[in-house]
Image (cartoon, helix red, strand yellow):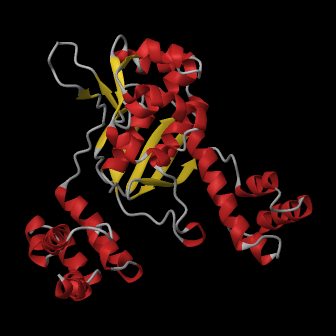
Amino acid sequence: MAEPPLTSGTLRERPLPRVVYACEQKRLTGVVEIEATEGRATLYVRDGWPVAVRTAKIVDTLGQMLLEMGAISVGAFHESLMRLAKEKRRHGELLREMGALDVANLRRGLEAQLKRKMVKLFSVQDVAFRIVAKEHDEGRGESEGIRLDPRWVIVQGIKNSYTPERLATDLGRLSGQNLRVSPSFWAGEARYGLAAEDKRALELLKRFMPRDEFEKQSGLGVVLAQMVLYALWVTDGLEAQASAPGQAPRVAKVTLSLEIDPTSALRIRVVTKLRGLDDLDHFAVLEVDRAAAPDRIKAAYMEMSKAFHPDRLAAANPSSDWQFEVCRDLRVPAVVSILKAAHLPLFELL
């Protein structure tokens, strides 16, 4: 039976940049299914970051990407295509077996392919979408660890696929407002991958400025200036000045709300945490900075111990057998023991 969607709608009502940002904010592991004209396109995300795009129409194949990059020769490309016609294999795996491709170039090709597919997805509009939380195997195997920062994706998607008409429509709510870049943007500015001229222009918005004045003074041209503004707006990176005198500025939020069923969210978190335990140090497991204060570390430990406690799983949905399966297959009681054992040295030092 198909999983129920967390939310659904159309990309006219909730444009893809907002959807991508919402997935990041919820650290979603699941899929965004888009009913494009040429068939369904599926965006796979893990912990809120895009890891794969699958489309009904096969475009931007790995072999084509590697050939464009100069990572394989024309001869190797054609030989691999002939072999693929006879064997059901992954193209990268076959090229490596042929000795025509090394691991580093394979990963470069896979990342370039994902970037191109992701950016093209932003050209889709006015179609239905649904977001489903579920585990999947995309982003594993030869593409393990290859993922795209959602902020970079949003900037590139807008710059490469948005028309002036779409920008005018989606930015309509900011008409006539005074804008300022929020402090939260500057803290994570590197994630956006903005060009040097974009960042220089945004220096103007360290103080409130009318939107039309920014577009004139930015030196970017009106359309590019609007693209940069839109990318910040949909990621809560802009503040709009209140119209009434004496009121404090407000963050110009447009975040798409995702209401995740608590049982599904708990299952996803348990699966993700257990898979990473062997590869993470104490601080990473607790999801705190290595320079975190002792009180912050203690609070993170208490929150995580409660979140993964078997009693909480049992109470989540006693009428369903998923809780028994998770406890049995994922050894959830062991998760708590592992966390306690792993962080004991930290607390001896505090």
Quarter that holds the N terminus: bottom left
**Up/down of 336 relative to 187, above or below:** below
**Up/down of 159 relative to 90, above or below:** above
Q: Is residue 318 left or right of residue 272?
A: left
Instruction: Kindly identify the residue that appears in the image at 7 percent across and 69 percent down.
Output: 315
| Place of residue 251 in the rendered image (x, y in percent of width and height, measured from the top left) | 26, 31
Q: How many marks?
A: 0
Residue 129, image quadrant: top left
Q: Is residue 242 left or right of residue 302?
A: right
| Place of residue 8 in the rendered image (x, y in percent of width and height, measured from the top left) | 32, 38
Residue 47 showing in the rendered view: yes
Task: Compare residues 36 and 138 and report the one nearer the observer.
Answer: 138
| Place of residue 337 in the rendered image (x, y in percent of width and height, measured from the top left) | 20, 87
Instruction: Kindly identify the residue that appears in the image at 46 percent across and 40 percent down.
Output: 34
In the current view of this chain or complex, which residue is farthest to the right?
A: 75
| Place of residue 305 in the rendered image (x, y in percent of width and height, measured from the top left) | 16, 75
Residue 250, image quadrant: top left
Task: Compare residues 55 and 212 and report the one nearer the observer.
Answer: 212
Residue 163 showing in the rendered view: no
Task: Compare residues 302 and 325 and report the one nearer the observer.
Answer: 302
**Up/down of 43 relative to 300, above or below:** above
Residue 268, image quadrant: bottom left
Instruction: Kindly identify the residue that appears in the image at 38 percent across and 30 percent down.
Output: 206
Quarter that holds the C terminus: bottom left
Instruction: Kindly identify the residue that appears in the image at 35 percent across and 18 percent down.
Output: 174
